Image (spheres, grey):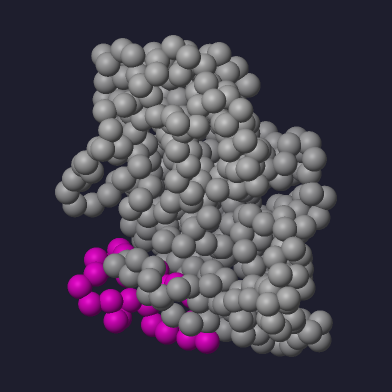
Amino acid sequence: MRVLMFGWEFPPHIAGGLGTACYGMTRGLAQNGVQVTFVVPHAYGDEDQSFIRVVNASDVEAPYGSELSGSEDILSRLTFIRIDSNMVPYLSPEEYVTRHDRCVKEGERQWRSSDLWRQRYTFSGKYGANLMEEVARYAIVAAQVARELEGQFDVIHAHDWLTYFAGIAAKRVSGKPLVVHMHATEYDRSGENVNTQVYAIEKAGMMAADRVIAVSNLTRRIVVGRYGIPAERVVTVHNAVRFAEGPNELPERGVSDKIVTFLGRITYQKGPDYFVEAAAKVLARVPNVRFVMAGSGDMMQHVVRRVARLGISDRFHFTGFLRGEDVHRMFQLSDVYVMPSVSEPFGISPLEAMRSNVPVIISKQSGVAEVLHYALKVDYWDVDALADAIYGLISYPALARMFAEKGLEEVTSLKWQDAAAKIKTVYESVVAEHSNA
């Protein structure tokens, strides 16, 4: 089975859980004998090359794996394609225009509209006129990639709304079946105040797809109910977690206080304000606790001001966005991990925390709650219940130890190789249907 996959980010350059999921998924697919050609808008050259090859888009016909001396056979089935792009993930159209205007003032060359309709593109990595134009450009590049790789893939797989038009374009050029992966819907990101353009792209991508993979049953219900996608075309495949290889050395802690961590984008979807309110309630009962908010986002200033008003700024720490080994180190330093998301399609970060032997508290409104039994679950809006859960884990060592030990056992069974096997079955079903059509 050969797959042409369109993603938007790949470690170590990530803006959220999407890149982490794509890394684990492609590695798992390789372990299941699936050859993956992974297309991203921009590759930086420092991606993990122990199991992938990083090549330029003009070199997409390079042979698989022959130069990967010393690598495992199953890890030599991945090709990584570099396409420079102007797009930045998780920016709203309004934010995109603002950043573009700033670049223009700083002397950057604005793209000419005539550039959009050339047959080939060499993307500069700078900002274009608007986000939707960049989505269209990526689709045109995707069509060109599909032409160049004609006969070298059996199915197309597109991740997240930024790549859905790319998947559609590749399908139209190649005639191959399309699978789209729904990692987060616009309803998850924005509640009821959806961006209608993004919603339209999401719906168009799922309507054009032969199969939609949802990361949870929660997401599947939204896809069917809110987007009108036929239920028989939507399949749930839960995410997993990848364990680090080699020795796991614990970092040195500089404080004796308990550490409670929030790690994620500081946006409405992730519920950071509920974390702050619960922190204030906990500190009213137990003073020797430090709360860490690791991440960045449009609610950062709001959260900082609220922390100050509550008078807990001496107990609160903002690290900014963390990636790679810094994320792992933060989990190792934590006594409790909290994910109070308002709407979380899945949520890989609790699995990563449990992997580090940390007890976790998650919202009932998360997809990961479907697969975890040894995690404390609360409604995201119930600040009192969240505060009680935090208090219990930091005040009763036996309780925290039980959740940490049982959680580690549980998360160990959630392997990307198993999730990828289910995805491979989806590929085989759409290819069979396509062949019989």
Examine the rendered structure and indicate whether residue 207 appears above or below residue 332: below
Q: Residue at x 44, y 29 (%)?
A: 315
Query: On the rendered image, what quadrant is the C terminus found in?
Result: bottom right
Q: Is residue 85 magenta?
A: no
Q: Residue at x 38, y 24 (%)?
A: 289
Indicate left or right for 372 with 190 as reference: left
Task: Please provide percent x and percent y for residue 363.
Answer: 54, 26
Examine the rendered structure and indicate whether residue 371 appears above or below residue 215: above
Question: Over which residues does the magenta segment extend?
Answer: 58-81
16 or 373, which lies in front?
A: 16
Query: On the rendered image, what quadrant is the N terminus found in?
Result: bottom left
Q: Residue at x 34, y 33 (%)?
A: 334
Determine if residue 95 is in view: yes
Task: Please provide percent x and percent y for residue 239.
Answer: 47, 43
Q: Is residue 80 magenta?
A: yes
Image quarter for residue 33?
bottom left
194 or 168, which lies in front?
A: 194
Task: Please provide percent x and percent y for residue 187.
Answer: 72, 40
Task: Please provide percent x and percent y for residue 270.
Answer: 59, 37
Q: Residue at x 43, y 51 (%)?
A: 322
Image quarter for residue 125?
bottom right
